[in-house]
């Protein structure tokens, strides 16, 4: 049975755990007067008595006694979904975002990341969901409860943070902020217990490893045309072999992010070698007479085992500067991959990468493609989107875990061929700060709710 959007209200009744449901809805659900039913929210379930509302038989307002609200730990009234599954009446869905670094501060409960999570939770408006944030320290395992942070409206129409006890959710969106936090014993324990003991779906669990993603995708005929040749170990032999094959290669940290630590190596016309990289002092470029002297300098303070050697791609340029795309994808409520945003990132002057932190500029992808390709824009855009969807599907299938969101770094070379350089399971949202990408930002946040509803079976 499909879920039904209703408006939940509470009324004071100290002794009976009961729920008042309009007569028409009772008939649809085949509920008898004073029938005993199990009502669940997230991972909490209690027994309650059904009362029929005959005064408003066709209404969509259900009322819950204060006793039932307390026993079920319902966070707040408002729009919510009602669904019958066998002998159980479910209300929800309850969607929890798991992270770390929470603190009891009603102005900034997630510290510097508070605005990031505020934006995510804005997608709850009018959706009929319980949407909240919690950390491993907030769980009461004996009662299946969490001490969670909600973003709630005031009578004046403003939204404020409220700390409210709620049931363990139906589904968890993993936004643990770093690999370091991911390795904490308490984080690993919580995720393992939620998935294996409580059977609670978690999507986007963990961080990707660049080499791990490459190993999954490169052997697959359906997507390997988009994957640059890559080698796991940055040995001198691998560097030399790749430099003989390609005029340009990249050395990338296996677990890096934001373009930190990436080096570009070029073989010049006079057979010398040029390396470019970014430091806190700015963009650096050095030239060496041989691959060996370059290698010795690069890995004087770096571990070759921590780096990949990747084929360099001669990217298309915009005003003389290379550009690539951040393609943001989501699963929708039908469990299909869709592109929510395609933003072009144009490299800064002399920069190795297109990242904003190294001087890159964000432009809506359609604008840039229109400027370069004119009436071929739609064709090129569709080519990139189609490749992104194929790659996202391949990653999810190969990994065998639920993925509801991906950030792919993609580019097109001078011949119009599409490439995928990196896949991110915890994509940042800095591209959505562009004034022309606000609708894409809203679409992306709504899709997170859609996929959560799918996993929660609502």
Image (cartoon, rainbow, N blue to C red):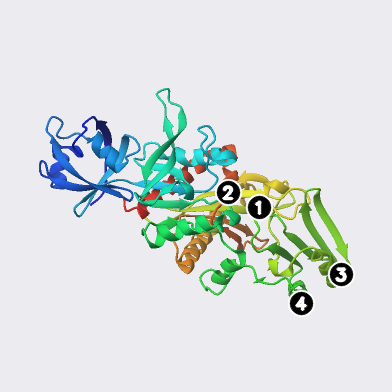
Q: Give the Cα distance between marks 3 and 1.
A: 28 Å
Return the residue at label 2.
428
Q: Residue at x 77, y 53 (%)?
A: 278
Q: Residue at x 31, y 34 (%)?
A: 77
- In the displayed orientation, state which residue is furthest to the front: 142
Nearest the viewer among 325 and 458 is 458
Task: Give SS at disc 2.
Answer: loop
- In the displayed orientation, state which residue is furthest to the top: 156
Q: Give the Cα distance between marks 4 and 2.
A: 35 Å
Residue 151 seen from this side? yes
The answer to the question of whether label 1 and label 2 lie on touching residues, with beta carbons closer than 8 A, is yes
Q: Is residue 255 left or right of residue 333?
A: right
Q: In the rendering, at what x and y percent does residue 226 appear?
A: 58, 66
Residue 338, label in figure: none
Image height of 5 relative to 415, above or below = above
Quick one: label 1 or label 2, which is nearer the N terminus? 1
Q: Give the Cα distance between marks 4 and 1.
A: 28 Å
Return the residue at label 3.
293
Q: In the rendering, at what x and y percent does residue 253 appear?
A: 68, 62
Q: Give the Cα distance between marks 1 and 2.
A: 9 Å
Nearest the viewer among 347 and 206 is 206
Q: In the rendering, at what x and y percent does residue 432 appear?
A: 56, 42
Quick one: label 4 or label 1, which is nearer the N terminus? 4
Task: Give SS at disc 3.
Answer: helix
Quick one: label 3 or label 1, which is nearer the N terminus? 1
Return the residue at label 1.
258
Task: Give SS at disc 4.
Answer: helix
Q: Give the Cα distance between marks 2 and 3.
A: 37 Å
Q: Residues within 10 Å of mark 4 (few under 14, many from 20)?
A: few
Image height of 432 relative to 227, above or below = above
Residue 237, label in figure: 4
């Amino acid at each position: 049975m499909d879920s039904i959007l209703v408006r939940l209200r509470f009324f004071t009744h100290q002794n009976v755990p009961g729920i008042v449901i309009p007569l028409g809805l009772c008939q649809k659900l085949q509920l008898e007067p004073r029938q005993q039913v199990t009502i669940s929210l997230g991972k909490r379930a209690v027994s309650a008595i059904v009362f029929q509302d005959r005064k408003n038989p066709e209404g969509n307002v259900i009322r819950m006694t204060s006793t039932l609200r307390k026993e079920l730990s319902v966070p707040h009234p408002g729009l919510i979904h009602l669904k019958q599954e066998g002998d159980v009446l479910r209300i929800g869905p309850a969607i929890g975002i798991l992270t770390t670094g929470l603190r009891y501060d009603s102005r900034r409960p997630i510290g510097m990341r508070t605005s990031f999570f505020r934006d995510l939770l804005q997608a709850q408006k009018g959706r009929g969901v319980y949407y909240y944030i919690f950390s491993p320290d907030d769980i009461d395992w004996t009662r299946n409860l969490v001490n969670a942070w909600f973003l709630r409206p005031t009578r004046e129409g403003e939204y404020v943070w409220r700390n409210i006890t709620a049931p363990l959710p139906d589904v968890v969106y993993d936004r643990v902020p770093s690999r370091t936090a991911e390795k904490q014993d308490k984080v690993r324990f919580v995720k393992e217990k939620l998935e294996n003991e409580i059977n609670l779906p978690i999507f986007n669990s963990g961080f990707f490893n660049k080499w791990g993603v490459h190993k999954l995708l490169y052997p697959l005929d359906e997507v390997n045309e988009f994957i640059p040749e890559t080698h796991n170990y940055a040995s001198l032999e691998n560097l030399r072999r790749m430099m003989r094959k390609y005029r340009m290669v990249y050395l990338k940290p296996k677990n890096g992010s934001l373009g930190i630590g990436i080096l570009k190596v070029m073989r010049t016309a006079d057979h010398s070698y040029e390396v470019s990289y970014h430091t806190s002092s700015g963009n650096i470029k050095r030239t060496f007479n041989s691959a060996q002297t370059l290698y010795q300098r690069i890995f004087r303070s770096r571990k070759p085992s921590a780096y990949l050697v990747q084929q360099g791609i001669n990217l298309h340029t915009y005003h003389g500067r290379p550009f690539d795309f951040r393609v943001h994808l989501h699963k929708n409520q039908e469990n299909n991959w869709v592109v929510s945003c395609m933003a072009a990132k144009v490299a800064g002057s002399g920069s190795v990468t297109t990242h904003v932190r190294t001087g890159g500029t964000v432009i809506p992808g359609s604008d840039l493609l229109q400027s370069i390709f004119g009436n071929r824009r739609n064709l090129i855009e569709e080519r990139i989107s189609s490749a992104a969807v194929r790659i996202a599907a391949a990653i999810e299938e190969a990994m065998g875990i639920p993925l509801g969101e991906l950030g792919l770094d993609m580019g097109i070379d001078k011949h119009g061929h599409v490439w995928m350089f990196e896949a991110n399971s915890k994509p940042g949202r800095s591209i959505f700060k562009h004034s022309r990408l606000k609708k894409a930002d809203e679409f992306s946040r709504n899709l997170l709710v859609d996929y959560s509803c799918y996993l929660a079976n609502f």
